[in-house]
Image (cartoon, rainbow, N blue to C red):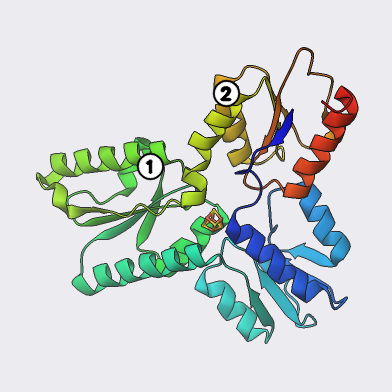
Amino acid sequence: MIEIDSMAGFCSGVNRAIRIAGKHLSGGERLKCLGELVHNEEELNRLRSLGMDFITLEDISRDWRKVFIRAHGEPPVTFEKLNTYRLEIVDATCPVVSRLQQKVGNSSREFKRRGEGQVVIFGKPGHPEIIGLMGQTSGNAVVAQHSSDFGKIAFGGPLHLFAQTTANQDDYRDFCAAVKQRSIEACGDETLVTITNSICGQVSRRAPSLLDFARMHDVIVFVSGRESSNGKYLAGLAGSVNPRTYTVSSPEEIQDWFGNAASIGISGATSTPRWLLEQVAEKIREITGNL
Ligand code: SF4
């Protein structure tokens, strides 16, 4: 038996962005996308072949007509620049990310109005979603990931914690507990810390379901781009319960790993397209003689 993990493939935010891009690409016009739409080279090549170019804000030219904003979202300063250049904006920011941007902005404005308090965003510095979130705060927020970042946090005053939507749930829980503890040590009052669990359900549900999936099969083939941090994390998780887990980025990398395997599971990162999982399944059928 060969089974593709039903939870694998793009999240709804990325699928939506690709659908929106598809509508604008169907007219034959080239579409400029700010940054890479997904962390998957195979999918990027497919989009390039349809007419999408991946550019940076520095590349912007008045000669273009439209600029596409991917699911991660952008800070307000990006929209201002695009408006200054009079470019049409195709905004495919994931609605979940947009709502989080609003919450972060509201909290930051409220702290400013009260004259005290700090927004703390748990996430990866420099990640595009984090840049978009920080942009809502006019600079009065910090990005932190570990207790080694605590020097940036103004303990003793009100704090509002948010997480990048793709953060690891367990790590965020530990981080929040450590911040609360440090806040109690600083002023004896843990109620000063407000925690918003902003991790996307589509991300947090992946880990437990992948563990079940990896246990159910004799061999797991995990499909992911080499640079995807989510891919490395999920492949490691599958490998922790199934030692016969192999990671590939394309069907060509598959070897005959399937001796004595009665069932083979195929899964992938949140940035792995469904069509690539199907190609991998096809390749495994060829190697195994259609299990
Ligand atoms: S918030 Fe969730 S659905 Fe939206 S882009 Fe992030 S992971 Fe995908």
Mark 1 closeness class: few <14, some 14–19, many ≥20 residues within 10 Å: many
Choose between 152 and 36: the one closer to the eye: 36
Under mark 2, the amino acid is Arg
* Residue 37 left/right relative to 109: right
* Residue 186 left/right relative to 48: left
Under mark 1, the amino acid is Tyr
Name the residue rendered at 73%, 79% in the picture: 66
Choose between 78 and 277: the one closer to the eye: 277
Q: Position of residue 157 (x, y in %)?
A: 18, 55
Kind of element beneath mark 1: helix
The mark found on residue 172 in the picture is 1
Name the residue rendered at 30%, 66% in the picture: 107
* Residue 2 left/right relative to 287: left
Q: Which residue is mark 2?
A: 215
Quadrant placement of the N terminus: top right
Lower position in the chain sequence, tag 1 or tag 2 = 1
Mark 2 closeness class: few <14, some 14–19, many ≥20 residues within 10 Å: some
Q: Position of residue 179 (x, y in %)?
A: 26, 42
Split into quadrants, the picture shows ligand 1 in the one at bottom right
